[in-house]
Image (spheres, rainbow, N blue to C red):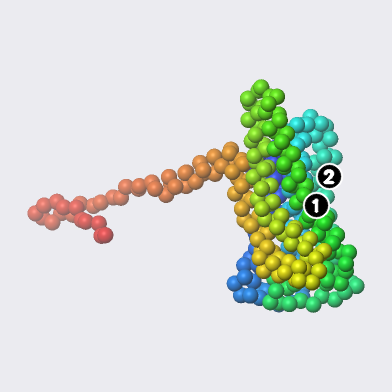
Amino acid sequence: MPQLRKQPANQTIFLLLIILFIEILIDLPMRLYYLYENQVAIQTGGFCMFWNWIASVLNIIGLHLMAFASIERHFFIFNSQFRARHRFLLSIIPMILSVIYPLAFYTGTVFGSWWCANTYDYSVLACGAPCYLITSAFFPLFGILTHHVLPVFIVVFANVILVIRVCHQKTQMCQVNIWRKTIRMSVQLLSIAFTYIIVWLPQCVLFIMLALGSGEVSTIAGWLIYEFTGNLTSLTAVFCPFVMLAGLPKLCHKIKRDFEKVFVRQNIVVPSHLELVNTGRQMRTPRANS
C-alpha cells in the first residue's frame, strides 16, 4: 500500500479516494436520513449551512481532481520526462488548488454571504439552496459553468483524446511491455472517468436548464435536481473506490491474500481432548452433546 501511494501516477487518485471517503463518512449519512425521514436530521440553521458547505466542497473538489487527473494522465503516458522535470508546476500546484479553491469559495459564499439572509426548508434536501444562489444572478451561472460544466467537459474531452492517442500509439509501438503499461494506466483512469461522466453529465445539463431556462423548463430542472439527480451524485463516492481498486491489481491481490489468511484461521480445526470413563464393565467414550 505505501508503495502504491508513493507512485506519482497514483497520488491524485489516492487524494480523490480520500475526498470520496470523507463524503461517504459525512455527507452520505445525512442524505440517507433525509431520504428515510423526509426531513433533515438536525433542524437548525447552523446544520443546514454546514450541509450546504460540506456537500458543495466535496463535490467540487472531486470534480476538479478528476479533471486534473484526466489531463495529468496524458503527461504520465506520453510526456513522463517533461512532467518529471516540472513536477511541482504540473502536479503539486494543481492538486493544492483543486482543494484550496473550493474550500475558500464555499466558505466565503455559504458562511460569509452578508448581503442576504438564509431561509431554510427542513423538508427539502440540504434544507434548500443557500441565499447567495437565490438573490444573485452571477453566482449561480458562475458556479454552474466553472464548478460543474467546465470540469465535466475537461473529463470528457481529455479522456476521448486519451483513447484516440493510445489507439494511434498502438500502430506505431513495437514494444509489448510499454504498450501493456500504457493500456493499464489508461484503463485505470478511463474507468473512474466513465463513472463520473455517467453521474455528472445529466446533472450539468439540468444545471444549465435551471440557470438559462425560463418558466416551466427551469421549474422542471430544479425539481429533477432536488428529487433525483441531486442524490445520484453520491454514487461516485460509493462506486469509485471499487473502480479504483479494480485498476490496482497488486492491491487487489494483497487484499485477496489477507482475506484468505483470515478465512484459513477461522476454519482451522482445533482437536478436543476426550476423557475415557471406566464403567467397571467396559471402556466407553462419552458422546459429544449435539
Residue 11 location in percent, x, y? 72, 42
Quadrant of residue 233 within the rendered picture: bottom right
On the picture, is 226 further left or further right than 132?
Answer: left
Question: Circle 1 — which element?
Answer: helix
Q: Is residue 180 visible?
A: yes
The numbered mark, 2 or 1, whose residue comes first in the sequence reads 2
The kind of residue tagged 2 is Ile
Classify residue 158 as left or right of residue 281.
right
Residue on which disc 2 sits: 93
Side of 6 relative to 100 (left or right): left
- Mark 2: secondary structure: helix
Measured in 3D between alpha carbons, the distance from the residue under mark 2 to the one under mark 1, in whole angstroms, is 19 Å
Q: Amino acid at mark 1?
A: Leu
Q: Are marks 2 and 1 in contact (CB under 8 Å)?
A: no
What residue lies at 70% left-to-right and 33% top-to-bottom? 166
Q: Position of residue 55 (x, y in %)?
A: 73, 63
